[in-house]
Amino acid sequence: MREIRRTGTANTHGLIGWVAGIPLLVAVLILVIVFHEPEKEGISRAMAAKSVALVVLPPEALREWKTEYGASHFSAEDMDGWYVPYMDYLYEHGFLDEAATPADEDHAQGTLTYGEAKTMMDAFSPELGALVRADRKNSGKPFPEEQWWLLYDSVLRREDPDGQVKTVELAIYGTPDNVPGTPPWTAHTSLGRLGFSGESLDRFLDHELSAYVREDELIHVIEDRGQDTVYRNVWVMDGDEKGLTVYLGDIERQLSFKRKTKKTDQMIHSMADLQMEDGRIARVSLKTDTITGKVLSVQEEAVELEDYGLVPLDTEYKVLKTYGQVERRELSDILVGYDTEEFVVARGKICGVLMVREPEADVIRVLLMDSGFRSLYHSSLTFSGTGAVTVIQDKKKKQLDAGEQFTVTAGAGELGQGRIILEPADGGEIQVRSVERAQGIPSYGGRLEIVEAPEGLVLINELYLEDYLKKVVPSEMPTSYELEALKAQAVCARTYAYMQLQSNTYSQYGAHVDDSTNFQVYNNVETDGRAAEAVQQTYGKMLLYGGKPVSAYYFSTSCGVTADAAVWGSDPAESPYLKSVALQPGRGSPDLRSNDSFDEFIRRQDVSAYDSSYPFFRWSVTTNSSVLTANIGGVGEVTGLRVTERGNGGVALKLLVTGTEGEKTISGQNAIRAALGDESLTIHRKDGKTVDGWASLPSGFISVQKLEDGTQFKIYGGGYGHGVGMSQNGAQGMAEAGLSCQDILEFFYDGVSVEELPEKENTNT
């Protein structure tokens, strides 16, 4: 018993000693871990700089800043580094100290330190700076990457409350390493093309990811969700038992089956969902149901089709051009008024829009504004026909006799979810009695459609393009002008309309253009035989440059020279046919970009030009400090005006406004004209007559003189309109001088041909 008891006592003491030693053992282990655990991997300064810069500015704005900034903290040999714009921005705005962090490749690619992380956070706010503890011990140590992205969440919560940097789910379809021709640092993804400078995405091919993205730039991959995903609404181009050739995103890819599959011929030229496992196709779900019909409108979440109404879009719908070479298109590319698409539907939603042929572009849809062209919307509309009119409402038809009136009122519930269509019989026209134009009550050929919007009724006129032009030409140019001038106007109007038709501006309502000066004035005055003849003699002809239609801008009167596309901030090299030319035989292009040369030119009344006999060839207006101060604002009382930059032809592009409380620069011809114009002013024309002022000056071809009393400014100007392309009065002057339509157009548009578009051979795949 004793022996047993001794043994038990000894065991008890041993157990107590062992338990008492556990804390000591744990403490030793912690010390071992602390001293021997490898340091966590840090984040590079370049990646940290990119993530910070893209909180402050979107990618495009950052690129614009870099272009305007011009200089760099980096040497010429490092300028090709992807990180240069981001780090330059941080150096310039106090997020990085160049003395502590030199601007070179080694430091950019090196690891961010605690001290640098704190500097960046302090530049945002003291509150964010307080989240980084940097002292003498750790200031120079690497800042762990994992900790950086936790900190980044706090930055986004405080500095990006609107969520411009988004957390998104996406799949990687291709990178420059596996898709030939892809630009550097560009990935093909389920969200479209994204930049990924500084990241490594090649290893994520066919993976589903969670990532930070701002607009078109991927900032950081948060999580890899693996390769088991579903590629939805994929276009199958070809295939065999081993795999499929598919159009994925905006690229062509070869995807292998997980197991050999027969009957792939049934999958070709179809839309499908692909179930992927380990990067290979495990299952194919075909979508074969399609509908067709004229597109009446394109909404953000639905497409309106004749006979179907609004059909909602699937969350991952695709728009593809399938004739010729397959190409990814956008929702905005769906042309209203045409039936050149097939719509793939599943579960009542549009999964894919297949553009199966080129539209003939022979029909245009015009949104008709209210009286005075003040608004797109009407409170009520009243119609009557010159002959019988068919009214289609809620898919029911009724007939109106000639002269019988029909009224629709906004908010009365007459349209439901659809639209009302009015079609005249036997080539007649429909009067819109609730609208007034210069001609009085206007009447329209083609058909009229009424749509209800929250703001009121929207009225659309669909008609043949050539018929539309017969009512544009007399609204844009007096039909008393020479026939060759009218023909030149017809060609310009046709080319302009064709280009605007492609742009689909009012697709949410189902129109291409409106009938005001926003585009081309349509049906403001009655047409006549001369306008119809000008359109007929130029049937189908457009201005082509390199075989493609141009942007055929035109305006009323020049100041003796025209401008180029720089008046809108565009690069003139993108539209080489729009050059600055002098309106004299032989053209020429005088250099009027200095204030001295332009001031002398614009103040002369004896300049010779094809349109120099017209009243607005020269004009002047006197304004004062009170008017300018009220219109411009932000500088106190205006004390000075000076043009600081002129474009080709002398047009003002930048105006420096000086005031008692500072100064500001107004950029762009339109902004300058608006800043200096006012309805209280009086405009003196070349013919000695005066007209009341307008909210915007007649043109941007101006010279400013401060008068002796110090509070008034005399503005000398010339021309009427933006000054780009063809002067309409210049065209009349040239026609009077015996020049033909082709001569006139080739004078104003450099290197163009006047011809019909070549017919395209459509291949429906």
Image: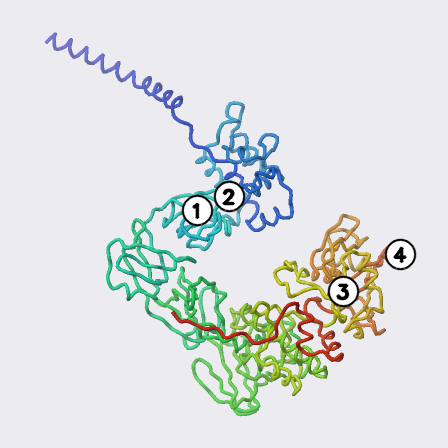
Q: Amino acid at mark 4?
A: Asp
| Residue 713 visible in this rendered orientation of the protein | yes
Q: In this rendering, is residue 754 above or below 590?
A: below
Q: Identify the residue position indicated by label 1 in the image.
A: 211
Q: Quadrant of the N terminus?
A: top left
Locate residue 725, reporting x and y percent. 68, 68
Q: Amino acid at mark 3?
A: Asp
Q: Secondary structure at mark 2?
A: helix
Locate residue 451, reporting x and y percent. 51, 75
| Residue 233 visible in this rendered orientation of the protein | no
Left or right: 387, with 326 as reference point: right
Q: Identify the residue position indicated by label 3 in the image.
A: 678
Select label 2 or label 1 by which is in front: 1
Mark 2–mark 1 contact, CB under 8 Å?
no
Instruction: Classify 10 Å Cα crowding around label 3: few (below 14), some (14-19), many (20 and above).
Output: some
Mark 1–mark 3 contact, CB under 8 Å?
no
Q: Identify the residue position indicated by label 4 in the image.
A: 709
Mark 1 vs mark 3: which is more N-terminal?
1
Mark 2–mark 3 contact, CB under 8 Å?
no
Depth check, front residue: 77 or 84: 77
Depth check, front residue: 387 or 273: 273
Mark 4 vs mark 1: which is more N-terminal?
1
Q: Amino acid at mark 2?
A: Arg
Q: Secondary structure at mark 1?
A: strand
Instruction: Classify 10 Å Cα crowding around label 4: few (below 14), some (14-19), many (20 and above).
Output: few
